Amino acid sequence: MTTSTDPSASGALPGATLDASRMPGHWLLARLGKRVLRPGGVELTHKLLDAVNLTGTDNLIEIAPGLGATTRLLLDKQPASYTGVDRDPAATSLVEAMLDGPNRQILQASASETGLEDNSADVVFGEAYLTMHPDSLKQRTIAELSRVLRPGGRFALHEVAFAPDDIDNPSAVKAAEALKSSIKVNVTPMTVQGWSTLLSDHGLRVEHTFTLPLHLLEPQRIISDEGYLGAAKFVANVARDSQARSRVMAMRQAMRANEAHLQAIGLVATKLENQ
């Protein structure tokens, strides 16, 4: 049965036992009450949903659903089947509590080795996952997801990209290091062209590309993503916890200082028929 329980009110969150000074930034934000943890917020997620055009006849795979904010939007489309794939046991438990009815499941597995059958999905939806992995794992993961996607199927990706496409290496390294240092997770963004090439190298033809500023922690984006009540709760929680507040401010400063070189990107691709 679907539940509306707030996972931040319990120890159910991934990384819940870690100290605020050391835990990955996205899980710290979740602990503080932020539900939407995607680079381009719900605005970019909705752009991807519109472009993918998920229907009731589609078999859907969602990669790294995390807290399940996008999962709810996907399930509202009533796909023929839903399979979530997340390697974090706390995340899989959170999403499992949301699943109601037949043909709904969440697997604790790596996106680079799902164990799913070849050509078993019409849509693959993945957000805020690959940026946190090295290029070699990006390649393995896209190869795996292309394998499970049927020819003609749609692939949606939501990540962080460098800007512009001809960014010089020192600027790219500086931006990535600033983000890595503040969120305490390894980050390896790619340029818009780099993400597009990654998909095309595995038989996925990019049909739509969207970019938005990386404004995850800007006031207007927080309100847009969380609503006024959710935003107020998040701000209050940040204000009460000095250690967490220091981390959040450092993350926001890293994004602001590198605004010219970091952006959110969404791509929708189609698997070629001969793959």
Image (spheres, rainbow, N blue to C red):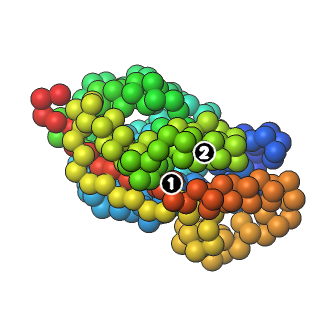
Q: Quadrant of residue 87?
A: top right
SS label for mark 2: helix
144 versus 170 height, above or below: above
* Horizontal side of residue 124 vs 130, given as left or right: left
Can I make out residue 93 in this image?
no
Q: Position of residue 28 (x, y in %)?
A: 72, 50
Q: Quadrant of residue 120?
A: top left
Residue nearest the viewer, comparing 219 with 161 = 161
Few, some or many residues within 10 Å of mark 1 (<14, 14–19, 20+)? many
Q: Which mark is residue 19?
A: none
Amino acid type for the residue under numbered disc 1: His
Quarter of the rendering occupied by the C terminus:
top left
Residue nearest the viewer, comparing 37 with 70 = 37
Q: Position of residue 150 (x, y in %)?
A: 22, 34
Which residue is the site of mark 2?
Answer: 174
Which residue is the site of mark 1?
Answer: 261
* Horizontal side of residue 86 vs 18, given as left or right: left
Furthest residue in direction left, as rendered: 274
Q: CA distance from mark 2 to mark 1?
A: 9 Å
- At 22% from the left edge and 51% from the top edge, which residue is drawn? 207
Can I make out residue 162 in this image?
yes
